[in-house]
Amino acid sequence: MRVFDIALIGAGPAGYAALTALRGFSGSLAVITGATPDPWQGGPAKVASVAFERQKPACLADRMPVSGDAPPMYAAAEVGGFANYWGKQLQVYGSDDPWGQGPFLETWKAYQTACDAVQADLEVIGGTRQQNLDSDFEASAPRLLVGTKDAPGSQLNAMALAVEKRLQEIPSVEVLSGRVRRIEQEQGVLRLDLGGGTQVRARRVFLAAGVLGTATTLARSISSISEIGFRDHAPYTINCFRLDRILGPTHNYANSGNFNALTVTLKNGGRCDLFASVYAVSQAPISLLTTNFGLGPRLRGRRVGRIFDFVQPIRLWTPKTQVQFRHNPSDSQTEATPTLDQEPDPKLRRFLDWLVTHGVRNKLGQTAPGQGFHYHRLTLGADRRAVDDVVKTAFDGQLRVIDASCLKQIGCPPHTLTAMAQAYARVRHDLESPEYH
């Protein structure tokens, strides 16, 4: 059977970054996209709505129930990954944010260079500061992925299109759909067992299946793993009335066609201590509302309308919104607990006080655990070892995890671009290392 020089598992943002790092690679490459032929019925309302608007079925896998009343978590099962649904924000972390400094990215300049490399062919808008607000808050246009250079208006199809173009550029590549069930060592190579009996062998493997996909794949492949751990953000939700008293009328800053209207931050030098996404309800698809009300997605292509902007939802991330997950592969439930103490959140308090000072009425809530989709910091085993250490021992250095699983810390802004930069840097590091050659 053919042995590939490299196998890449996953075709989401981290997979795209890996393919970018592999440009010019002359060896043989197998890409297992993770795509499945069967659409998933149900899932989060946002997924159902976006899939309806894209006119493509929602493809989810690896359902993982969560304790309490929280809805289950899912992994993506298609080219483009979860960026097809909500991966629009590509934020560049500040110099004092946890951008993943280490042997793969040693300086912030190197991090910036990696960010530039992975987004060079993507169409990204926003990011410019619009105004300094009082109380040290800043408002800026959200930095959004809205397409590719070839298809600038492709919106939530952008990552899928970008991956497909990268695949067309590689001279010796074989693309396989399906999900990897197990990874085994076999006579100096790694064997990947896919569903349906398909097997792929490769000398080196890059695992970019997303945190849930990576966790479940490794749990099936390493018999000693008795526990999976990872983190997420569970941001606050704030519904605001009269927010125009601070930010002005919504139509002055809303991005036409984009639910993400404005970003408000609180920064301390090169670190972001608070990240708030302000949404324009007028730009939300009606299908999102009908799905949230249990009616299923309806009225494709229709927006809610400006009359509904009198209520403006905000999602707010602070250092205290992180949640720790623990999962035993033999159990049916995943336990979610806050990572920090339950004392009042000073950054949240400061933001709420700022709203009240300006006469903005608000109602505070919090998203359910696991629904922020900022998964990171994968640990394996009861001793909670970092995923890098576990796979290095288990696979003799032939396998490298390159998705957000390897980020030990993330900041308050969305970390998609930071995870892509890390993936790019890890693949480049291995390709350039003497032991690879």
Image: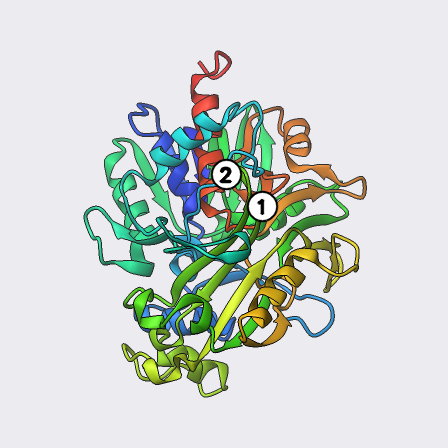
Answer above or below: position of 179 versus 304: above
Answer above or below: position of 400 versus 73: above
Circle 2 residues within 10 Å: few <14, some 14–19, many ≥20 = some
Rendered residue at 44%/46% (across/down): 91
- For the C terminus, the quadrant is top left
Query: In this rendering, would 385 be left or right of 307?
Result: right
Query: In this rendering, would 166 be left or right of 348?
Result: left
Where does the image place residue 261, in percent across and percent down from the top left? Answer: 38, 64
- For the N terminus, the quadrant is top left
Query: In this rendering, would 372 be left or right of 54?
Result: right
* Three-letter amino acid code at the position of disc 1: Gly
Rendered residue at 24%/36% (across/down): 169
For the residues labelled 2 and 1, the Cα–Cα distance comes to 9 Å
SS of the residue at dot 2? Answer: loop
The reply to whether residue 1 is in sight is no
Query: In this rendering, would 305 be left or right of 425?
Result: left
Q: Earlier in the sequence, mark 2 or mark 1?
A: 2
Where does the image place residue 60, in percent across and percent down from the top left? Answer: 48, 63
Front residue of this view, candidates 270 and 408: 270
Mark seen at residue 262: none
SS of the residue at dot 1? Answer: loop
Front residue of this view, candidates 217 and 294: 294
Which mark is nearer the camera, 2 or 1?
2
* Three-letter amino acid code at the position of disc 2: Gly
Do labels 2 and 1 touch, CB within 8 Å? yes
Give the residue pinned by disc 2. Answer: 94
Q: Quadrant of residue 57?
A: bottom left
Give the residue pinned by disc 1. Answer: 411
Q: Residue furthest left?
A: 150
Rendered residue at 24%/40% (across/down): 168
